[in-house]
Image: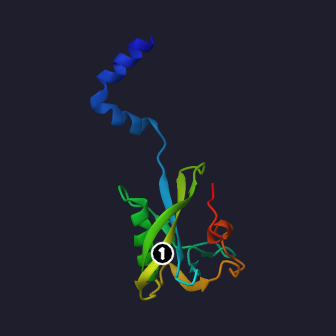
Amino acid sequence: MRRLLARLWRLLRPVQSRLMWLLNAKFVVGVTGVVRDDEGRVLLLRHRMWPPGRQWGLPSGFAHKGEDFRQTVVREVKEETGLDVEAGRLVMLNSGFRTRLEIAYEARLLGGELRLDPFEILEARWCRPDDLPEDVQPVCHPLVRGETVP
């Protein structure tokens, strides 16, 4: 039986990827940047679309199809703030959400002029890791402290 299944699978080689696509779960990927300046402060944004009481968080957005996740960080920070960053090490990879995967990278400020996207962002603030707004998203605390979140 195993040999028969293996032979069948090999015969399906031209359509294997399509079959795998149809048979497996699909996810959107939320990507976050932990942006730091030269003084060690982290960039926090107050997001318009997030629930009241939890509107402060890190720059984030969804990856485009085929986009490298590090490039998602660069693009999202630029779109939301006008700032240029360089994505660094991966600090969070969480799955288990219904159809979403969450990823976070450290990011270093390179330059640019702070210009907020008024559709998405209400306010921006550079914060020391021990001085975050009260209504910051809970996941921000370990990320801002530089901890890797499992």
Residue at (63%, 59%) from the top-left corner? 149
Judging depth in this view, the residue of 104 and 52 nearest the camera is 104
Q: For residue 17, which quarter of the picture?
A: top left
Q: For residue 74, which quarter of the picture?
A: bottom left
Question: Where does label 1 land, which residue?
Answer: 108
Q: Position of residue 124 (x, y in %)?
A: 55, 85
Residue at (62%, 68%) from the top-left corner? 146
Above/below status of 64 relative to 108: above
Q: Position of residue 31 (x, y in %)?
A: 50, 63
| Side (left or right) of 98 relative to 107 | right
The N terminus is located in which quarter? top left
Q: Position of residue 111 (x, y in %)?
A: 42, 84
The scheme the figure's colours follow is rainbow
**Amino acid carrying mark 1 in the image:** Arg
Q: Position of residue 43 (x, y in %)?
A: 56, 80
Q: Secondary structure at mark 1?
A: strand
Above/below status of 22 relative to 30: above
